[in-house]
Amino acid sequence: MALVVTSYIHLKIKARMPHNHPTLINKRVLLGITGGIAAYKTPDLVRKLAELGAQVRIVMSRGAEQFVTPLALQAVSGHIPHNAQMTAESESGMGHIDLARWADIVLIAPATANFIAQLNQGSGHDLLTTVCLATTASVVVSPAMNQQMWKNSTTAENVASLIERGVAFLGPDSGEQACGDVGPGRMLQPQDLAQQLAGLFQTRELEGKHVMLTAGPTWEAIDPVRGITNHSSGKMGYALAEAAAEAGAHVTLVSGPTSLTAPVNVKTIHVRSAAEMHAAVFADIAEQDIFIGVAAVADYRPVDSSDQKIKKNHDEMTILMTKNPDILADVAALKKPPFCVGFAAETNDVETYARAKLERKKLDLIVANHVGGSETGFGSDDNIITLITSSSKQDLPRASKSQLARHIVSRVAELST
Ligand code: PMT
């Protein structure tokens, strides 16, 4: 079943894994376990998710602990599972809002008929249901129950209503059940469930498109050991490159200096200065359908960069600077420009400044980045953004850069086709 996204968003990989195989690398999976016999399979499920590259955190319902021990789950996940009784400690460590924000995807496995009913009602009576209410991530349900309970008309209505609202269902499987019945209601096997979950990220929204991005800071050398740069970590641009590749695009990432690992399935070109970034972009821009400028490009560079380390011989020093080329504006000014997306990091009057950049640089879409807070923007894992075109505006709440990247990719796919 395809992942339907209505709310806006929806360990290391084994070296032998083929590159086009869906993975969960860099994905944060919040596994919610409810009280059914299939819960005994969840330690294996955690291992299978981790083998595909996922980071896994666990929330157990009160009933789940009757079927699987928190200790077993802690051993395989490396983290203490969160349980129904929220303590002051769990709240100060990672409370329900932090957990809800942390997740790229929330997988409920096994999900009982009772949990499905609660989810449909919007109940927030324990940690797991509260996290489901508070998250902007996609919620995926893997049901496990007696075949008659699955066929029950109330359950069927709950499932239909949740699907309508964007919740995805994986399974159930059919076969012999723990109670002796035969029919639909078995939880998918952990291996299949992990693979199908990874497959949900492969949206195909940009299938076959050529997408180029810039990311990270630039480094404008003053001498061999000093330079002018900024606090961009590259996280937003790398997350977008990854999301575009998952959406089926051929992705070229032109990256300034960062400490990040190049995303899989992405051609990554490393550069240092704005001039190098400009040259790398223009070497291949004619092939691109979409261009996304995420990099924090230095506006100016020193006119002269010394070949040797400058000595401290003077009390004062003046560095004459000259303007760098505007990569994004130059791309948008091409005779046949690709679909052009810019970013605008602003602390105040965010929309006004972003709109001005949209118009001045002749862009199709601008992502206004609210960088006033300490936990969003440059260097952080989260962002707060507004998507602006000449005729539309969409505010997105604070979320992880990877969640936002998937949303931006969906919007670009909508607007560019
Ligand atoms: O890397 P992170 O730590 O994750 O942080 C992400 C980010 C905050 C750097 C990113 O989300 C962001 O907002 N990048 C744009 C920063 C900015 O405000 O750039 P600007 O206003 O100087 O430029 C506007 C647009 O023109 C940007 O798309 C920029 O890439 C592009 N530009 C600017 C100057 C220039 N010489 N060439 C360009 O292509």
Image: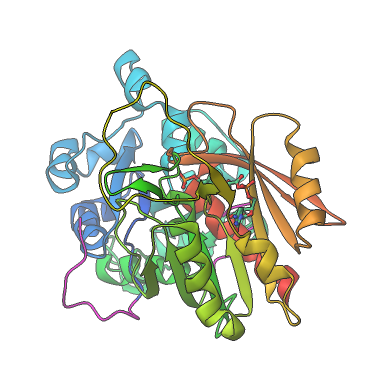
Residue 413 lies, in percent from the top left, at 66, 71
- Dominant secondary-structure state across the stretch colored magenta: loop
Of the 4 image quadrants, the one containing the C terminus is bottom right
The verdict on residue 158 being magenta is: no
Looking at the image, residue 282 sits to the left or right of residue 49; the answer is right
Looking at the image, residue 31 sits to the left or right of residue 167; the answer is left
Q: Nearer the viewer, residue 176 or 132?
A: 132
Most extreme residue toward the top, as rendered?
88
Q: Is residue 138 visible?
A: no
The answer to whether residue 191 is above or below residue 155 is below
Quarter of image, res 406: bottom right
Quarter of image, res 185: bottom left
The span picked out in magenta is 1-21
Q: Residue at x 30, y 79 (%)?
A: 19
Residue 92 lies, in percent from the top left, at 35, 18
Q: Nearer the viewer, residue 21 or 126?
A: 21
Residue 149 lies, in percent from the top left, at 47, 58
Looking at the image, residue 203 sits to the left or right of residue 147; the answer is right
Q: Is residue 401 visible?
A: yes
Residue 330 lies, in percent from the top left, at 67, 67
The verdict on residue 8 being magenta is: yes
Q: Residue at x 36, y 51 (%)?
A: 29
